[in-house]
Amino acid sequence: QVQLVESGGGLVQPGGSLRLSCAASGFALDYYAIVWFRLVPGKKREGVSCISSSDYTTYYADSVKGRFTISRDNAKNTVYLQMNSLKPEDTAVYHCATDLRRFSCSDYEFYEYEFWGQGTQVTVSS
């Protein structure tokens, strides 16, 4: 059974950092592209970052480029999202997602991924 579980969210002051984790079970995470999305009520979902399976190429939304870093730990079957210099506009529920037919990050912002985690809340506020 494919399952993704996010953790690491919380309340942080502007300028602070958090590291989100996406732990996978039921499949080998390193064979597939993994995407982080964030959702804010009333707003369109945003594809924050993606890491591909083959060459581990990484992609970022312009809004987080230079501040966020996506990475894999295949031994732990986990993908991370390191978030630095956080801003209030980063406040959202962050979800990781994957699809066992997707290996690249092509059009990751728009693809309808089959498997999603439950999400972890990130709140950036003073």
Image (tube, helix red, strand yellow):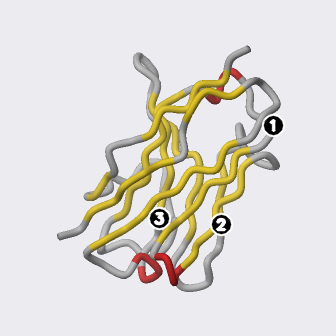
Tell which circle, 3 or 1, labels the residue nearer the N-terminal end.
3
Q: Amino acid at mark 3?
A: Ile
Give the crowd class for mark 3: few <14, some 14-19, many >=20 residues within 10 Å: many
In the rendered image, residue 113, in percent from the top left (x then y), is placed at: 32, 56
Tell which circle, 3 or 2, labels the residue nearer the N-terminal end.
3
In the rendered image, residue 125, in percent from the top left (x then y), is placed at: 68, 17
Q: Kindly identify the residue that appears in the image at 37 percent across and 68 percent down.
A: 24
Outermost residue to the left: 1
Work out whether 62 lies above or below 50.
above
Tell which circle, 1 or 2, labels the residue nearer the N-terminal end.
2
Q: Which mark is residue 85?
A: 1
- Front residue of this view, candidates 68 and 74: 74
Residue hosting label 2: 58
**Distance from the alpha carbon under mark 3 to that under mark 1:** 23 Å
Q: Kindly identify the residue that appears in the image at 46 percent across and 24 percent down.
A: 40
**Distance from the alpha carbon under mark 3 to that under mark 2:** 10 Å
Q: Amino acid at mark 2?
A: Thr
Which element is circle 3 on? strand
Q: Which mark is residue 34?
A: 3
In the rendered image, residue 21, in percent from the top left (x then y), is placed at: 52, 56
